[in-house]
Image (cartoon, rainbow, N blue to C red):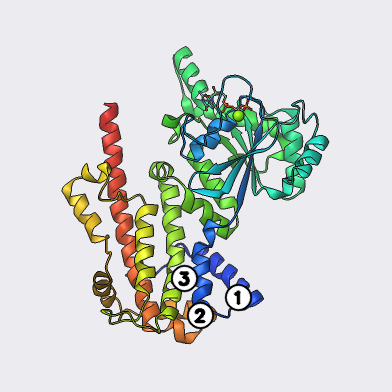
Amino acid sequence: MDFSVGSVHWQEKQGQDIQKEIDENGVANFEEFFRQRLERWREIEVNIAITGDSGTGKSSFMNRIRGLKDDDEGAAEVSVIESTVSEPTPFEHPTNPNIKYWDLPGIGTPNYPDLETYCTKLKELKMPLEEYHAFLIFTAHRFSENDLKLAEKIKSIGKRFFFVRTKIDVNVQSEMEEKRLFNEDAMLKEIRRNCSENLGNLLQNEQDIFLISNRSRDLEKWDFKRLTLAIINTLETIQQETLTLSLDKVLTRLSPDLFRKKVEVLKGRIWMVAAASAVAAFVPVPGLSLAVDAKLILGELSFYRTQLGIPDKSTKEYKALPFSVQEKIGKVSLTTVAQLGGFLARYSAEAALEDVMRYVPILGLTIASGMSFVATCCALRKLLNYVEEVALLVIKEAAEKAGKEID
Ligand SMILES: Nc1nc2c(ncn2[C@@H]2O[C@H](COP(=O)(O)OP(=O)(O)OP(=O)(O)O)[C@@H](O)[C@H]2O)c(=O)[nH]1
Ligand SMILES: [Mg+2]
């Protein structure tokens, strides 16, 4: 049996954050603390700045990363004509308004002739550079002098920035048409090298350049997925939870890395669910031999299903799945206390010493070694593993179906 909760790295970072919080503020009520902590990702603000010249694909990118088409409600306006955006404009994530992608007009536009005016105006608008958690600087050709000045400034305040070269599909297409021997890797290398020269000392690592296409059908190609992951990874732990758990299933289905990141974040929540449930468990649930908060655990299981894209029974997608997959979905669709009781009972004896020890410093010996905590941890891990397995089958089916449609 695998007792690891997420990657050790993620879990340790998260444990340290929580330990620090408890040390600093003290906790009067553990149950309340963990319940709130489990929901906090919904309230955390994430501000991503998107900047660069007109026509470089900023709006298109903001739509794609939010899982939107250009004509969906809430989409940023995409146009072949220069946009009239003259003030920083926030675009909210459809499922979480606390995540905002900010369309920042490029320096050199009439309202913002130079870096100094730019910074002063952003301050006046109460969104100074310090307020953003990551910066993406866009180009479709070469980064401009102003882009470079801005990057320098961002660097000086210790913030992370990424360089994004869009419209790679256009380059690929034209080379493919015009060259007898077309070598895509060589072309991409050349573009990367050009950008790198263009950026000079500002670039710390060539991996900070992302070559992307914003066309929906290209999201799985080139660096779009890597860029999404890089944005997530540059954030603080709790913000990583926020962005990861808000990602649309279109993206997690395209990228095994993003899918894994979601699973990792979900795994990292298990001990907190178990802790909140175990503390609440002083009032036993009828029908369960172990005292746990069944509602909380079933709620988390349902969260796994939506997060990992398991289709609901009422949907067309579900109905189109082979019976064998539907059957598996049934197995991870526990909804009653009695079903959960049966599941938990199997894990009540599987206490893992190293697990318990890991949480003693935070939870204290009584909670961490209690049967309710240990059984809930084991059961949730097992359930998450099942949901992950089924989700991968659903993804495989979706990919095969998409493949057939293209044929
Ligand atoms: N082929 C291709 N076209 C793109 C890509 N990204 C954007 N476009 C097109 O380029 C044009 C400009 O894109 P926008 O997303 O509006 O660019 P923007 O940076 O928001 O421009 P402004 O709002 O004027 O600053 C539109 O016609 C888009 O459809 C891409 O990666 N590949
Ligand atoms: Mg735009």
Few, some or many residues within 10 Å of mark 1 (<14, 14–19, 20+): some
Q: Is residue 43 left or right of residue 203?
A: left
**CA–CA distance in space, label 2 to label 3:** 10 Å
Which residue type does callout 2 highlight? Leu
Please say whether residue 159 is visible from this viewpoint.
no
| Contact between labelled residues 3 and 2, with CB atoms less than 8 Å apart | no
**Callout 1: helix, strand or loop?**
helix
Who's the residue at 43% across and 70% down the image? Answer: 273
| Contact between labelled residues 3 and 1, with CB atoms less than 8 Å apart | no
322 vs 227, nearest the viewer: 322
**CA–CA distance in space, label 1 to label 2:** 10 Å
The mark found on residue 403 in the picture is: none
Who's the residue at 40% across and 45% down the image? Answer: 249
Which residue type does callout 1 highlight? Ile
**CA–CA distance in space, label 1 to label 3:** 13 Å
Who's the residue at 40% across and 78% down the image? Answer: 373
The mark found on residue 22 in the picture is: 1
Tag 2 or tag 1, which sits nearer the N-term? 1
Q: Is residue 29 left or right of residue 326?
A: right
Residue lying farthest to the left in this orientation: 323
Tag 3 or tag 1, which sits nearer the N-term? 1
296 vs 342, nearest the viewer: 296
Is ligand 2 within 8 Å of the beta carbon of the residue shown at mark 1? no
Q: Position of residue 213 (x, y in %)?
A: 50, 30
Q: Position of residue 358 (x, y in %)?
A: 48, 77
Q: What residue sits right under mark 3 in the picture? A: 272
Q: What residue sits right under mark 2 in the picture? A: 363
Tag 3 or tag 2, which sits nearer the N-term? 3
